[in-house]
Image: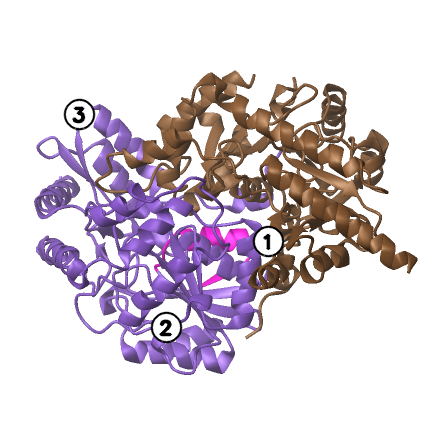
Chain colours: A purple, B brown
Amino acid sequence: MNVSQRGEQMPSSPIRKLVPFAEAAKKKGVKVYHLNIGQPDIETPPAIMEAVRSADIRVLEYSHSAGNESYRRKLTEYYKRVGIEVNHQEILITAGGSEAIVMAFMSCLDPGDEIIIPEPFYANYNGFAVMAGVKVLPVTSYIDTGFALPDVSAFEAVITPRTKAILICNPNNPTGYLYSKAEMEALKDICLRHNLFLFSDEAYREFCYDGTYISALHLEGMDQHVVLMDTISKRYSACGARIGALVTKNKDVYATVMKFAQARLSPPGLAQIMGEAAVDLPDDYFDAPKAEYQARRDLMIRRLNAMEGVFCPNPGGAFYAIARLPIDDADRFCQWLLESFTHNGQTVMLAPATGFYGTAGLGKNEVRLAYVLNLQDINAAMDCLEEALKKIRLEVRD
Amino acid sequence: MNVSQRGEQMPSSPIRKLVPFAEAAKKKGVKVYHLNIGQPDIETPPAIMEAVRSADIRVLEYSHSAGNESYRRKLTEYYKRVGIEVNHQEILITAGGSEAIVMAFMSCLDPGDEIIIPEPFYANYNGFAVMAGVKVLPVTSYIDTGFALPDVSAFEAVITPRTKAILICNPNNPTGYLYSKAEMEALKDICLRHNLFLFSDEAYREFCYDGTYISALHLEGMDQHVVLMDTISKRYSACGARIGALVTKNKDVYATVMKFAQARLSPPGLAQIMGEAAVDLPDDYFDAPKAEYQARRDLMIRRLNAMEGVFCPNPGGAFYAIARLPIDDADRFCQWLLESFTHNGQTVMLAPATGFYGTAGLGKNEVRLAYVLNLQDINAAMDCLEEALKKIRLEVRD
C-alpha cells in the first residue's frame, strides 16, 4: 500500500532531523544547549494555569466552532491594546497558529495557486503549502541588509496570474527582522495593485526591541486583503496549549474559514480557558519576559559578532537570529557539533539555515539560533560555538 | 478579494444550519430538546479532570509531535484491552478524531483520488474530502435492512483505478449500525482484492449493545491496509478536549502522517493528560454510561416505532438512530419543528438525514436522532415528535 504523492512531497521538519544526533550525544553524557527550536524556557503565567485548575467543568463539551464567545469577546480587548480594532465575529480560535495558516490557505487559495513568501521563512509554511496544493514563490532577503524586506521589484518579478497572496511573519521567524512602516506600506501597495491577500503571521508581536511594530491590520484600506494568524504559544510561553486565532475583517473569508472550522468541530477546550485568562494578566506582564529576551539577544549577538568570521545582524524582534559562519555546509557543521565536538563536555544544537530557504543552495553558511535559554546557558552555548569554529579553523590550516 | 473555489465547495455543516431557528425558538421561551448533535450529557470522569488540575506544569511546552510518549505507551494498554495489539510507535495523537481523518486522507490519497463511503455517513467526511481534494463515492445502505453493509457488488460497481480507500464508521454515526464479523471480512476481501486502504473511524467502540464489536485492526492480513481513527470525545464524554489518535501498522503511512504532524508541531497538551489518566479509570467505568445509553436507546426506539407511520431500526451501537417518518421533506419538517410547533411549550431539534447522504435525493423522509439526553428528556422529546406528526397528519387530512 503506497502513500500519496502529496505525502511523499511533504517535507520532513528540517529542525528536527538532527534530533537523533542530539539524542545520541546526550546518551554519551554530553550536555546539549538547544538553540535549535523556539521552545521558550519562560514560565507559563501561573495565573492562566490556575484558571484551568479552578474551572468548574462537569462535561467538557464541544465549544463553538469559532471558539468560546466569551474568549473571542475578551480577545477584542487584547487586540484593542495592540491597536487592532476587531469584533468577536472577526476572530476565530484555532488549534495553534498552525491551524490558522492551514485554514487561510484552504479558504483563499486553490491547488496550483501561488503564494509569495520572503525567504528565509518558517519551514513549516512549506508543509502547509503541500497540504493545500499551493506553490511557494520565495523572494530572497539578504543577511547583509539584516534581512530587510526585498525590493518591490523582486516581488513583482515573480507575480503571475496564479499568484494570490503574500505571507509574512512579523517580527520574523527565523530572522528576527521587524518590518518597518515603510516596508509594510510597500507590501500594502503590492497587494492592492495586484489584488493579493496579505497573510500576516504575528506570533511574536509582543517581542519587539527596536523600531515600531506595525500589524498588517494597522494598514488602512487593507481590510479585505488581510488575514492575520496568531497564537498564544510564544506570547504566554504556552506552546503546548495549541491555541491560536485567525483574524480577518473580510466577511467572505471568515464565513469560508468557518466551514473548515465546523468540519473539525471545535478548537481545544481547556486551553481556551488559559487564553481567556491571559487577557486579564497585569498590563506589565510582558515587561519581564521582554526584558529577559532582549538581554539574551544583546548577549548572543555581541558574542556572535565577536567571533572571527561570524556576522549576525541585530534582530529587532521575536527570539531568533540568523548568523553567517565561516563554514561551507551548515547541515554538516550542525551535525558535526552533535556527533564529534564537545567543549568541557558540552555542545550546542543549531538549526542549519538551508531549511528556511525556498531557493536551493541558499543559507549554506548560515544557522538559525533561538535565544530561548537563560543568559548563563547562552554564554556557555556561545563558548561551545566559538571553540568549535576555532577547531575547524585549525583543522583547515593543518 | 475572492475566496478559493475549494472554500466555496466546502460544505456547511448540515447539522448546524438549523441552529438559528433553535436560537429563535429559545428566545421565544420554547424549551428545545437537542437530539440533533452528538454532544453527550454524561459527566466527564472527574478523575481525568483532576489529573489536569494536579499536573505540575511550569512551562506548558510543545509535546512530541506524535503526542507524549507516556500517553502513547499507556494507550497500548487500552488497545490491548479491546483486543488490538499495537506499540506506541504505531499510535499518533491528534487534535480529535477529525485531525486523524484529515491526516489519513492527506497521507494516503492524492487530489482526484476516490474514497468509497457507505451512506448515510458522517457529514464532515465531505468536508475532509474537499480539504484533501478527494472524491467521495457513496455506496448506499438502506433503512429497511437496518443499514447493513451494502453488498460487495455495490462496492465493486463504483471502483475505478482512482479508488484508493474505503472509509467506515463502526459502530456507525449516523445509523448506529454495528458491522458484523461477516461484513468486516467482506470489507477485508474487497480491500485486499482491489488494493484499497481501509480507514476505520471507531469513535464509538465502547458503546455496543448487541452483537460483537470487530475492529478493523482485528482483521488478519490487513496490517498494511488499515488506518484507524480514534478519539476520546465520546468514549469519556470529553468532546471539548480535542484528543484523538491515528493508529496504523503500516510504517510508510505512519512516517508520512508524522510529517503532517510535525508541521503542526504537537497535539493539545493539557488534554493529553486527560487521555492518559483515562486509561487508568476502573475496568467497570464504561458499565454505567453504556447501560445508560442502552436504556435511552431502548426507550427511544420503542417510542419511535410506536408512532403511526414511523420506522426506526434498532441500532447495535453508538448513540444515534435514523428513523423514517411519514413526511416528505425532512429539512422542512425539522425547521418547522423549531419555527412553528410547540407541545406544552416544548419542541425537539432533529437532524434531517439528507445531510448524511452523498447521493442527492436520498433521506428526504428520514431524520437522525442522537440519544444523548436523559430518559425523562427523551420521553418528553418523543412526546413532542409524536404530537408533531399527529398535527401534520391532521393538516394533511383537512
Other-residue count near label 1 (Cα within 10 Å), few / some / many at <14 / 14–19 / ≥20: some
Which residue position holds label 1?
Answer: B31
| Helix, strand or loop status at disc 3 | loop
Q: Amino acid at mark 3?
A: Gly
Which residue position holds label 2?
Answer: A216
| Helix, strand or loop status at disc 2 | helix
Q: Is residue A283 left or right of residue B391?
A: left
Other-residue count near label 2 (Cα within 10 Å), few / some / many at <14 / 14–19 / ≥20: many
User: Looking at the picture, do discs 2 and 1 lie on one chain?
Assistant: no
Q: Chain of mark 1?
A: B
Quadrant location of the C terminus of chain A in the rendered image? top left
User: Looking at the picture, do discs 3 and 2 lie on one chain?
Assistant: yes
Q: Is residue A197 left or right of residue B326?
A: left
x and y percent of residue B275 in the render?
42, 31
Q: Which residues are magenta?
A: A120-138
x and y percent of residue A19 in the render?
31, 35
Q: Could you say which disc has been placed on residue A29 in the image?
A: 3
Residue A36 shows in this picture: no
